[in-house]
Image (tube, rainbow, N blue to C red):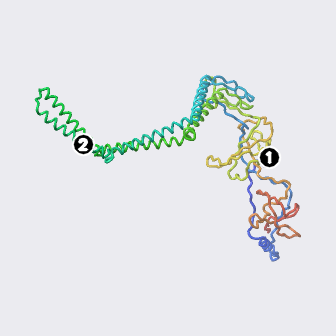
Amino acid sequence: MLARLNRRPYRIAIAAITGAAALGLVYYLAIYSPRQAEATEPEIQTSVVRRGDLTLYASGSGTLIAGKQSELGFGTSGTVAQIYVQPGDVVQAGDLLAEQADVEGLEAEVAAAELALHEAQQALDTLREQADLVAAQAQVAVADAKEALDDAERSWWSQQEGYRASSVTIKAAEAALVVAQDAMERAESRSDDFEDDDPQGAQGYKDYAAAVQSYWSALASLNWYTGHPTETQQAALDAEVALATAQLAEAQRAYEKVKDGPDPDEVTKAELQVAAAEAELASARRNLDMAVIEAPFAGTVMEITADPGDEVSGAFLTLADLSVVKLEISLDETDADKIAVGYPVEVIFDTYPDHLYTGAVVQVSPSLSTEMGIGTVEALVQLEGDSFDGLLLGMNASVDVISGRAEGVALVPVEALRELEPGKYAVFVMEDGQPRLRTVEVGLTDLTYAEITSGLDVGEVVTTGVVETG
């Protein structure tokens, strides 16, 4: 068994001929026909079907690793306050390994995160509790927006030509203009009879000025009633209507969102804020919890890369469970079809060449690993047994993955096989001194032997070829 561990993986190599079984027999008879008796007769090589074992291997190399290993550190960067172990110490699950300084700061972060979560949750609760009030306020906003639009539209129409006043109002304005003009003319004639420094004359001029003002006011009123907005005024009126229309649409959209409950967008936003606050609190609590490092499982302290007082970020302590060991193995990529989870494995460590370890494949990488242009299949092997005294992590080993095994089966040399068609074989069996073609079923094969699962019995003689004799 140990000798087999150093063999390269076997490949199926079968001597084959093409054509049907009849052609094979014709070929044989042509060689060994009586006409050849006068010439030098070839010697038929034969082999006896024997019972034996056949095992297929895929060979490679491996490195011993811990079955369970953990890189430990604080939850956040900080100063190491105390380390309670040293490399080589064996610890139990829950044992105190190290502590971080400035725990008070981490506790303050937890308190701040708790407050932030409380506020976020309160905002979400308020959003849900005030749904009816928000809906009522949104409905009032819609009513106010409608009223504002009505006002804007009335103002728009009231400024348009032909809509500024009724016919009665226009006639009254025309009459007022006639009266004002008459009053202005009479006041003007009276003002001419007085001197400027005469008090009565001054009063007359004052009355005239008032009459002029009344006239222009009456004229302006009439012109406005019968006129139209300027381009600038019309643009302003249009803008006021457009704004009021947009504000009403926005108020209606807002009401539609809340009329049957809280605004879904606002609820989603509030829920996300709660989730973010929960995550922040979880992280703060984790950092506080990890300020004290405890052994997650029973094992051996392998390495410590920091001292008390050092500032650390990330893992600085390695713990491994050496009671269960595994092997990282590599095979040539051409052996990818010869390894799978569950396949048995035989291992010999370079340090202990006379001891055979066994195990099984527990994991196969789904992709090739390439180094210096060479592709390899990477896999993980679980070694069997509960004692691995003398084995050290990192030890190298030779590995044979057993991809097939047949024990106590009928075996013939591969040279005896004749391939009739893909997957169909026959052999020449010596019967009464003559070779006769017989179909057989073939199981496992390696470079030397083939397993015969049916068609031959142990002890029968098969031909393996001919040798010319002088």
Circle 2/circle 1 CB separation < 8 Å: no
- In the image, farthest residue toward the bottom: 35
Instruction: Find disc 2 in the rendering and name its residue.
Output: 175
User: Callout 1: helix, strand or loop?
Assistant: loop
- Can you tell which quarter of the image residue 412 is in? bottom right
Instruction: Find disc 1 in the rendering and name its residue.
Output: 2
Q: Amino acid at mark 1?
A: Leu
Residue at the image point whose x is 87% and y is 69% from the top: 433
Question: Which of the pair 194/10 is nearer the observer?
Answer: 194
Q: Amino acid at mark 2?
A: Ala
Q: Horizontally, is 237 left or right of 360 in the view?
A: left
Q: Is residue 76 above or below residue 405?
A: above
Q: Could you say where residue 145 lies in the image, as x and y percent from the top left? A: 45, 40
Q: Could you say where residue 281 lies in the image, as x and y percent from the top left? A: 61, 30
- Earlier residue among tags 2 and 1: 1
Q: Horizontally, is 2 left or right of 233 in the view?
A: right
Q: Is residue 362 above or below residue 435?
A: above
Question: Which of the pair 232/3 is nearer the observer?
Answer: 232
Q: Could you say where residue 319 lies in the image, as x and y percent from the top left? A: 70, 32
**How many labels, in total?**
2
Residue at the image point whose x is 27% and y is 45% from the top: 171
Distance (Cα) linking label 2 and label 1: 132 Å
Residue 399, visible in the rendered structure? yes
For label 2, the crowd category at 10 Å Cα-Cα, with few meaning under 14, some 14 to 19 and many 20 or more, is some
